[in-house]
């Protein structure tokens, strides 16, 4: 049930408005001047406000100005009620952020029609805002996810680059031994020396094979998903 705040200094009009709205199944709170009305608006946060313009204490324009300056009440729809039908008054009210403007005397159906229309419009606006907020949240999540995936990809590329450099260096040592052993094997003059350099060749071959097998194993391990897991468990630096 929507809560309507009526701010009106004419007691009979205030009573009539309350009765009309309650018969239409609205919940109603009332204030007989702008000061009390403003306090109620801030405390009760109604769904809509009907507000007279010419009132003692705070007039309707001043009430609206105060409401629009408070984040909690800034979006509450407000309909002005007034005996003044001057076009400049209308422009002043709308310029301050009023949602509608009904002149006295008015018929009950005018009040109900205006209230229902403004509540419906406000509801649609809130739904659109909620949908936009949800879309923004989804977009932010996608951006965060893409940023994380990019970081994982960049980190993976850096790790692979560092490992490639390391393996390149590791492969050079056995190759040096192989080159040296081949040269010395050609120069060997007896079986003993040939066996010695063949043994060096076999050892260097085994080292090269171990390094290549290690490369294959790391290729399977170093995926973007594994990199993410390793970082989550703080096994990799940032």
Image (cartoon, rainbow, N blue to C red):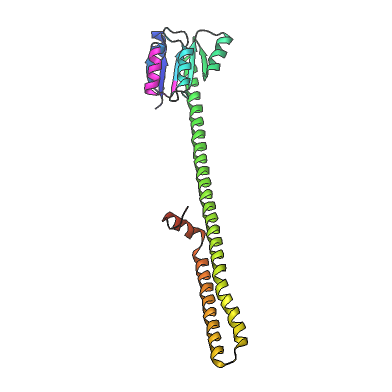
Can the viewer see residue 102 in this picture? yes
Can the viewer see residue 15 in this picture? no
Horizontal and vertical percent position of residue 152: 51, 54
Horizontal and vertical percent position of residue 135: 52, 40
Above or below: residue 172 compared with residue 61: below
Q: State the residue at coordinates (50%, 33%).
A: 129
Residue placed most toward the observer, 120 or 24: 120
Residue placed most toward the observer, 23 or 177: 177
Horizontal and vertical percent position of residue 191: 56, 92
Range of magenta residues? 35-48
- Identify the image quadrant of the N terminus: top left
Residue placed most toward the observer, 59 or 157: 157
Secondary structure, magenta segment, majority class: helix
Above or below: residue 147 compared with residue 94: below
Is residue 44 toward the left or the right of residue 81 in the image? Answer: left
Find residue 43 and report its image quarter. top left
Horizontal and vertical percent position of residue 73: 44, 23
- Total labels: the figure holds 0
Residue placed most toward the observer, 227 or 90: 227
Q: Is residue 41 magenta?
A: yes
Is residue 86 toward the left or the right of residue 236 in the image? Answer: right
């Amino acid at each position: 049930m929507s809560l309507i705040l009526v701010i009106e200094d004419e007691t009979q009009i205030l009573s009539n408005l309350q009765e009309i709205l309650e018969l239409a199944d609205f919940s109603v709170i009332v204030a007989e001047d702008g000061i009390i009305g403003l306090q109620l608006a801030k405390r009760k946060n109604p769904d809509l406000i009907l507000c007279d313009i010419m009132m003692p204490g705070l007039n309707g324009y001043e009430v609206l100005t105060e409401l629009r300056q408070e984040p909690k009440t800034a979006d509450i729809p407000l309909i002005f009620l007034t005996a003044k039908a001057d076009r400049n008054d209308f422009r002043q009210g709308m310029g301050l952020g009023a949602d509608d403007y009904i002149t006295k005397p008015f018929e009950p159906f005018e009040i109900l029609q205006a209230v229902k229309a403004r509540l419906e419009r406000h509801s649609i606006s809130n739904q659109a805002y909620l949908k936009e907020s949800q879309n923004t949240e989804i977009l932010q999540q996608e951006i965060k996810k893409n940023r994380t995936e990019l970081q994982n990809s960049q980190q993976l590329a850096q790790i692979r680059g560092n490992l490639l450099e390391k393996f390149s260096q590791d492969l050079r040592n056995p190759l040096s031994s192989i080159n040296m052993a081949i040269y010395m094997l050609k120069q060997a003059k007896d079986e003993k020396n040939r066996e010695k350099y063949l043994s060096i060749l076999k050892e260097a071959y085994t080292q090269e094979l171990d390094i290549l097998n290690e490369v294959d194993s790391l290729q399977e391990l170093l995926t973007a998903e594994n990199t993410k897991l390793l970082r989550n468990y703080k096994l990799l630096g940032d």
